[in-house]
Amino acid sequence: MKYCKNCLQPDTRPNTKFSKDQLCPACCYYDKVRDLNDWEERYNELLRVIKKYRNNRSNFDCIIGVSGGKDSTRQALWVRDKLGLKPLLVSLTYPPQQVTERGVNNLSNLINLGFDVVISSLSPITWKEMLKEGFKSFTNWAKGSELALLSCVPQIAIKYKINLILWGENPGLQLGDLKTVGKTEYDGNNLKFMNTLDGGSDKWLQQAGFSEKKLQPYKYPSQREFEKSSLQIIYLGWFWKDWSIINNGMYSVLTGLEIRKDQVENTGDLHGIFSLDEDWVTLNQMIKYYKYGFGRVSDYVNEEIRFGKMSRDEGIKLVELYDESCGQKYIDEFTNFIGISNEEFWTNIYRNVNKDLFTIENNGTIKRKFKVGIGL
Ligand SMILES: [Zn+2]
């Protein structure tokens, strides 16, 4: 395990590759961006690209997937108020047992801001079975629900005959999932290659016995369907100079976003602004940490380090303290929902801990072998 020379991104992130100077893709991207300073040109480029979708009299101009969280709230307002487009917002909600009150309030906030929102809500029975299967087979409960979250936007775009999908972050440039990089730096049509969707993404569900009918809402439209409907995904993140976790959070709080109030020791969420519509993301981040050696705090500090707002050493301290944080109450809620015991939960985690990076002690404590910022 090696760390990026600039930030605290380890090379264990799936689909990532460091430069020969030992920089992660996100740092390389920000380096380039800093030198270019071509934001006005980029904005004009965006205006040029969206021109043909604008002022569609009989339809919405574009579609945006929203959760009511920090990124989607900011995007929706920007697209409507700055670009002057008429967006249809699409929200796939979590089932009642999983969604947080704050998540419901945040979606209401978006509706109150005057948008048209299509809310899609899937059968909680299939949802629960899928969470359980994802956790059992991959220690990742979100493996199935992410498919639904990613698929519902193009599915609804096709049904409503809307050709333009606006997406926020470019997972290739801004996170380092290089397979998703498209023809241009804002072309999102290769999103289908992202780690979650790649390689027959629902095969594991078919093998687990989920019928085609049940899987319908979890299917990302094929390349052919994209072409037939002339669907284009554009990453907005590429056009925004101040796109960042904290900026999006601050901006959205000012327009009514409700944030997470639990302390960082329980959530690993430094500023309480991630995945606000549900809380089991906390245990998934802890699991990600045990698999790859980095969690949510790393995502926060890496961005701050890149922007020159935090030193690498300060980042190391925060990652050491909180990157594996997860309050027991979130584990309890989750295990109750899928119907497994706390022991079964941990047995599965222990089985999947990356033994190159961690040791499991006799009392069950998981200890890292690597040094944060240095590696192994
Ligand atoms: Zn980096």
Image (cartoon, grey):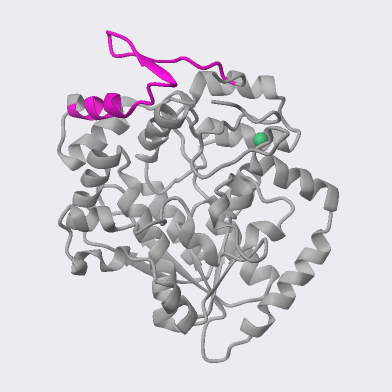
The residues colored magenta run 344-372
Residue 270 appears in the rendering: no
Give me the residue at 43% from left, 25% from top: 325
Residue 3 appears in the rendering: yes
Give me the residue at 18% from left, 52% from top: 208
Describe residue 108's horizontal placement relative to residue 253 as left or right.
left
| In the image, residue 325 above or below residue 169 | above
Residue 24 on image: x %, y %: 65, 38
Nearer-the-camera pick, 16 or 322: 16
| In the image, residue 338 above or below residue 92 | above
Describe residue 210's horizontal placement relative to residue 100 as left or right.
left
Ligand 1 image-quadrant field? top right
Give me the residue at 52% from left, 91% from top: 58
Image quadrant containing the C terminus: top right
Q: Residue furthest bottom?
A: 58
Residue 360 on image: x %, y %: 33, 14
Q: Residue furthest front?
A: 20
Give me the residue at 44% from left, 21% from top: 357
Residue 97 on image: x %, y %: 24, 48
| In the image, residue 76 above or below residue 61 | above
Tally of numbered discs: 0
Please check the rendered image and state whether residue 345 is part of the magenta-colored stretch, yes or no: yes
Please check the rendered image and state whether residue 70 is part of the magenta-colored stretch, yes or no: no
Describe residue 335's horizontal placement relative to residue 166 as left or right.
left
Residue 145 on image: x %, y %: 33, 53
